[in-house]
Every structure is written in C-alpha cells, then in structure tokens.
Image (cartoon, rainbow, N blue to C red):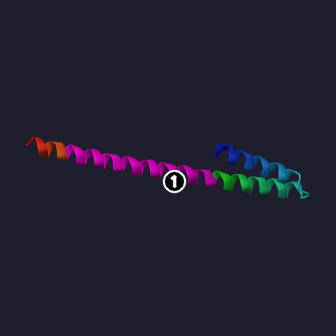
C-alpha cells in the first residue's frame, strides 16, 4: 500500500511538472494535490486506529467475560 501511494504521488508530481501550464498554477496544483494526499493519509490512519481501538475493546470485553465466568465457577 505504501509503495502504491508513493508511486502515485511521484507520478502525479512528474506529470504536473511537465504539463504546459504557468508556474504559479502548477505550484498551486502541486500544493493542492499534496494537501489532498495528506488528508487522505490522515483519514486512512484514523480509520486504522479506530479499528485497533474497536478490536482492543472487544478483547477487553471478552477477557472480562471470561474472568467473570471463572469467578462464578469458583464460588
């Protein structure tokens, strides 16, 4: 996934640099695309972190349930 994003970004930058547009417009497009990629990456990281948190909560709930089962069987 990392290589795909890197390849995409490099291809995008090279393509934009060789485009026949004014320099200010080209720099603005590079900046905009960079910001878009940064936002997409931040969303991806937030999504992965949310999945880890959800899984951690499920594991904690399962462990608590098992501990309660053990306590009730010991009585």
* Near-viewer residue (65 or 53): 65
In the image: residue 46, left or right of residue 15: left
Residue 70: horizontal and vertical position, in percent?
17, 42
The correct choice, above or below, for 19 with respect to 72 in the image is: below
Any magenta on residue 45? yes
Give the total number of marks visible in the rendering.
Answer: 1
Residue 75: horizontal and vertical position, in percent?
8, 43
Any magenta on residue 61? yes
**Residue at the image point whose x is 63% and y is 46% from the top:** 1
Residue positioned most to the left: 75
The local crowd at label 1, few if under 14, some if 14 to 19, many if 20 or more residues have their Cα within 10 Å, is: few
**Residue at the image point whose x is 21% and y is 43% from the top:** 67
Residue 9: horizontal and vertical position, in percent?
74, 49
Range of residues picked out in magenta: 39-68
* Near-viewer residue (61 or 70): 70
In the image: residue 1, left or right of residue 45: right
In the image: residue 18, left or right of residue 49: right
Residue positioned most to the top: 74
Prevailing secondary structure class for the magenta stretch in the rendered image: helix
Residue positioned most to the front: 73
**Residue at the image point whose x is 81% and y is 53% from the top:** 27
* Near-viewer residue (33 or 50): 50
Q: Quadrant of residue 74?
A: top left
The secondary structure type at the circle numbered 1 is helix
Residue 16: horizontal and vertical position, in percent?
83, 54
Residue matched to label 1: 47
């Amino acid at each position: 996934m990392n290589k795909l994003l890197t390849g995409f970004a490099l291809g995008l930058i090279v393509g934009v640099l060789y485009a026949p547009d004014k320099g200010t417009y080209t720099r603005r497009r590079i900046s905009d695309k960079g910001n878009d990629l940064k936002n997409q990456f931040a969303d991806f990281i937030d999504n992965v972190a949310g999945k880890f948190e959800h899984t951690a909560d499920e594991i904690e709930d399962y462990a608590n349930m098992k501990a309660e089962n053990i306590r009730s069987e010991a009585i």
